[in-house]
Amino acid sequence: MSQTAQRSRYVLKRLLQAVPVVIAIVVINFFLLQLAEGDAVDVLAGEAGSATPEYMAQLRQKFGLDQPLLVQLGVYMKNVLSFDLGYSFRHDMPVAQLVLDRLMPTMLLMVSTITLAVGFGIVLGLIAASNLNNWRDTVISVFALISYATPLFWVGLMMIVVFSLKLHWFPTSGMENVAMFYEGWERVKDIAHHLVMPTLTLSLFYLALYTRLMRASMLEQADMDYVTTARAKGLTERRIVFVHILRNALLPVVTMAGVQVGSLIGGSVIVESVFAWPGLGMLAFEALFSRDLNLLLGIFLLSALLVVAINLVVDLLYSFLDPRIEVA
Amino acid sequence: MPETLVKKVCASVLATLALAVSSHAIAQNAGGTMVMIAQPEPPSLAPYLSTSGPIGLVAPKIYSGLLDYDLQLNPIGDLAESFDISEDGKTMTFNLRKGVTWHDGEPFTSADVQFSIMEVLKKFHPRGPNTFREVNSIDTPDELTAVFNLERPAPYMLRAFSAYESPIVPKHLLEGKDVREADLSNNPVGTGPFKFVEWKKGQYIRLDKNPDYWKKGYPLLDRIVARVIPDASTRTAAMESGEVHYGAFGAIPNVDVIRLRDFDEIGVTTDGYAMINPMALIEFDVTKPPFDSKAMRQAISLAVDRQFMIDNIWFGYGKPATSAMTSNYAPLGLYTPTANYPSTADVPAAIALLDAAGIKPDADGVRATAVIDLIPYGEEWRRVGEYLKQSLGDIGVKLELRYEDVPTWLKRVYADYDFSLNINYFYQLPDPVIGVQRHYGTDQIRQGTPFVNSARYSNARVDELLEAGAVEANADKRGAIYAELQNILADELPVVNLFEMEFLTVYSEKLKDHTVSAMGPYGSFDRAYLDK
């Protein structure tokens, strides 16, 4: 069998395996969310200022909240299997539309953060490892330690104070300048401008993580027998580091990045909140507090799918990085 | 003024006057985009279904009411040019403005008024069934006249015709549909100065100038954008950097306001909340010990230092409560200061009261223990709880604080009655029938309904007075009814009112004429402009 055919069979198999996993996630989430006190009707009535008991009963009936739990689950599963994420009663909109609207900003923030964090993490880890215990290593390690230990919301607010209020380099918040309503290229530039501070804030933590991981991984590989062999063959130090060690050292970093992409969706709530970035994390947060369970389940389902997809990509990446790892 | 006899308000005169006064502003200051803070994000844009604060900020720019109110709370014309009240107070006739159209181009007529009140507000609005309960029917003899036929006189109703409290909605878009599910709630179509354009959830709501607005030359702004910014510190930063022009209802926390108010380019005002009248208070469960004891509740009212809370938690903004009703009702002749409401603590009196009632301390000095629930609407309420824990400790009432998320808290207090004390705040609104009655009436003990009589307080005389006050057209008699009511409530204290809250509006000095009516932030902003 050719390698391409083998790969596509592998992808197909993995996707099929993911179906029961995703269903299990939906069911578990559904029951977990039932543990929260109060429901969407309580919140709606609370916000409205007041409401009659009849009105509230009517709303519960409309939302199907008066049905037994298993019936509610059944209805939800039936919808999901026909690719319908249900309706958000709070927003008066289909869940799919709400979630898709927020997906773009989330992906933007995620991709730029991962690129920045992994890219610079690898470079910094590499520099630190190849300058073991000299000043470069010390500077990088101290930087990593500090950024790892600093709370994100504080970093975000300090960025706003320094770069928005004092230097006027960047806007404080939002995804675009809403007073201007730019079009085309102007809009792209505007969004990029707004993206800088949230990305920097969110990447700082991950950057520290990848730097430390990369440094440790490089040092571990450097002690391996194959490195001694390579050196004995008379390869240049440069070739040993970049071709032999680097390739192997990257594996744990890739693994970690794969795991973290999933957590980035939820973990970015603080950054989204500080910079008023309209991402999925914030939407999930609000959905929880308004007991908008359909919406919350929709977001969970989407992130579960995203994690499955990214894990698959990571596994495929392994086989490219280290051809000894076979997909099957 | 409007309670008595036949009154005719020629609001168009006022409107013309306003036009004349600021006509220079039209020429020089038209245009521009105003950015305001809407936080939290509104759940919908259906002001006829919900009185939620953020909806109130945005919707009155799109929808209009029959009347608006000047800063002295006098009604002025909006969709109605003028109105008459019959001799017996049972017929109200509204003469509607000519040439008003909905944002989709359809003409506005008396049928819209009839439909809005009878089919929408009276049935679906949270306060509407109460506000319009005396309205039996509305006649529409012609397209520009709406005649309200009342069961009994309802003087309080005259203060409920603003765009915020009773928006007039388009009949042609709602008739025959399920009002609660109509597409209109996310795509509002009104008659107001601004048209709804787009809502990017989690980001902003965009409204553009309505070129066909009935008030010629207005609105002055080209566009209003209401931005969602979840983090309070970021809201402050956005105001400081000039990215937003306007934040009302404490969008900027008081702790930041005391810094921002020193800036030349930023203004702060407490004006514009006279129709809302927010009051901070403690609710009890009066059916269970230890707070079924009147002496206990009186002692608590005596032991709290209201001025201390205002000075230290709200940075000086607020006024100690002196009665169950806000002192802002004074111009209406409905306000009476009462006993048991000291502005600073009187601990010896409180202790003497408890001793006399036989509520004795145990060996550790504890007379009662209870959990106090705190309204989960911001950090300040946690401070209030911490303060109460300490101050009530002085009289031997030992408190434990509980702070939960909004749905859990609402369910606990209003659906399960699983609480002893609860910190909360209520809007008393422009009239006690609309804002105060829901707190004390026996018919307002409605399990599962938020923000009503959760104390489960019931007093036949109070019920009688509330009923009488609602239909009394004579201002003096009405004042006497509410005076008796306030004295009973001050003695029995089913609710201990703490302080009249002062919400803060923070604005860019470039933004002018934003607070020009009693509706303040809930106003239409048709006269607001950005100074260039």
Image (tube, helix red, strand yellow):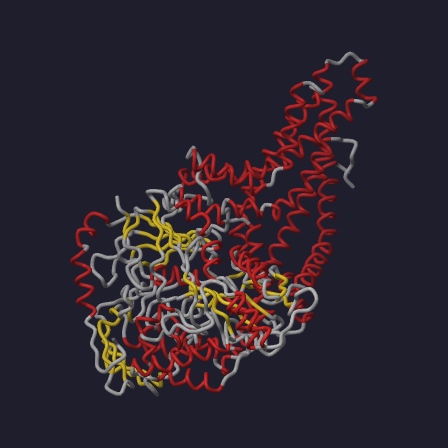
Image quadrant in which the N terminus of chain B is located:
bottom left
Image quadrant in which the C terminus of chain B is located:
top left
Residue A3 versus residue A232: which sits nearer the camera?
A232
- Residue B428 image point, x, y percent: 41, 70
Residue A150 shows in the view = yes
- Residue A153 image point, x, y percent: 56, 43
Q: Quadrant of residue A244?
A: top right
Picture layout, residue A167 above or below residue A35: above
For residue B414, side relative to residue A69 (left or right): left
Picture layout, residue A298 above or below residue B445: above
Residue B377 versus residue B24: which sits nearer the camera?
B377
Picture layout, residue B257 above or below residue A242: below
Residue B169 shows in the view = no
- Residue A141 image point, x, y percent: 67, 27
Q: In the current view of this chain or complex, which residue is farthest to the right?
A: A225
What is the count of numbered marks?
Answer: 0
For residue B415, side relative to residue A128 (left or right): left
Rendered residue at 60%/41% (across/down)? A151
Residue B296 versus residue B224: which sits nearer the camera?
B296
